[in-house]
Amino acid sequence: MIALTDGQILRFVDRLERDEVCMHGFELRQGGDIRAQGDWRPFDRGEPHRMYSVSKSMVSLAVGMLAGEGLLRLDDPIVRYFPDLLPPRPDERLTRLCISDMLRMATCHRATTYKTAPCDCWAASFFTVAPTHEPGTLFQYDTSATQVLGVLCERLSGQGLLEFLQNRVFDAAGATGPKKWLTDPSGAPQGGSGLMMTLEDLGKVAQLIMDGGRGVLDKGYLSLATTRRIDTPLERNPEERHGYGWQFWMTRSGWAMYGMGGQLAVAWPQRDLLLCTTADTRLDAFGVQRIYDAFFESFSQPEEAPAGRGQLRERLDALEVRGVRHDPGARMAWTGTYRVASNTSGLEAVAFGPNEVRLEWKHGVHVFAWGAPGCVQKGVFSGTQIPTLTSAGVSSGMLRVRCQLIGERPGGVEMLFAAQGPHLTIRLRGMSDPYIDCYDGWFCAHA
């Protein structure tokens, strides 16, 4: 094992900062020991984050335990366990779908079913939405498959999904921090996306997997789950084209538990390295890839110059979430009210005040306030209790405002404003929450 150096870790952190990756925290382990960890203020160590699709890997661990106990077989057809959710005449392609194909995302659906046919019981939609192709053939990321597997784990274990995993896996890994599993409208756990846990606990569970299960998890199942079970050549990010296991992604040098926005546990077995991160990269189409590249490239090259004593600790202590770019000396004195030209989105007016912008929609008013230019300020989203981080800055005469939704319902809004005389051009972009679905498109307004 080639030991990491402080200089390599500094290079990793500097690259994330240079690439403007919106990081919340990281933990780097080698040989099972924590080599470095850092949190970008205002995020604190020990604070639960929504893990999104890291939840899928945890469901896979539960499925593996139940298989090991003989409560299910991986080649069982899934319909065997859900007669109550089947339509009167289920499609034959659905009846041929087995659990192992669901684990490797080779289902008979081309999309997540509860998104194409919204309903309260997300698992039920998996059985009622018409299949589009033969199961066990091609990879298609289908979160509704994991939703069904999570419900299956509850049915067979007689426990809630989080309770089962806490008692059988998390406690054994020492992952005893605060956790929560968000539910669908019917009260079932959101198996594919709902787990909230701390970065430290994610690291402890990932290390348990790295260690072959340590007798808690079946080593044979883990070996199969964390090796390629299906090809993924058409995925958008390069790292996602290395294949998929049983609810684990393959990478250029190992495997990963990957949740939307940069919730990651990336294992590099050959180097005995494990990187865990929390982040919010959804406003950057290649943000997660930037984390992968920083990890593999920073630690594959030798240290260029030895880091001075205490240099790494000083750097990690100074981490903070960056705000949007602000040109030195640029004026933030944007004022006035602009009426929006006719559009179908419902945006009617934009008004600027001291360190704030007010968007008036037909359905309500949203106010975004910030502090010093380029710095992040905590708040809540208008009319809700959803916590936010907001920043603003002026660059090349353009005002940019970013609002990140954090907590249980992460998302984000980007706003650009460019004024020429009485004319205001606006571009809005929102991600991942019904409150901000309206933030999409270009608008013209006039003073």
Image (cartoon, rainbow, N blue to C red):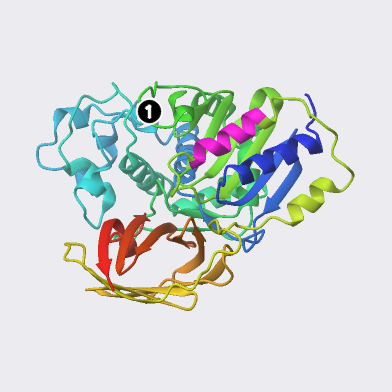
Which residue is farthest right? 309
Could you say where residue 399 lies in the image, as x and y percent from the top left?
Answer: 45, 62
Name the side, left or right, on which 180 lies relative to 230: right
The magenta stretch is 287-297
Name the image quarter holding the C terminus. bottom left
In the image, residue 263 above or below residue 237: below
Could you say where residue 407 lies in the image, as x and y percent from the top left?
Answer: 49, 62
Q: Is residue 243 visible?
A: no
Name the magenta segment's main secondary structure: helix
**SS of the residue at dot 1?**
helix
Name the image quarter holding the N terminus. top right
Could you say where residue 419 lies in the image, as x and y percent from the top left?
Answer: 36, 64
In the image, residue 312 above or below residue 445: above
Name the side, left or right, on which 250 lies relative to 211: left
Name the side, left or right, on which 191 lies relative to 203: left
Name the side, left or right, on which 94 lies relative to 250: left
In the image, residue 403 above or below residue 8: below
Q: In the picture, residue 87 is in which quadrant?
A: top left
Q: Residue at x 18, y 33 (%)?
A: 131
Q: Label 1 amino acid? A: Ser
Q: Residue at x 27, y 61 (%)?
A: 438
Number of residue marks: 1
User: Could you say which is closer to the camera, residue 140 or residue 25?
Assistant: 25
Which residue is farthest left? 89
User: Could you say which is closer to the camera, residue 73 or residue 410?
Assistant: 410
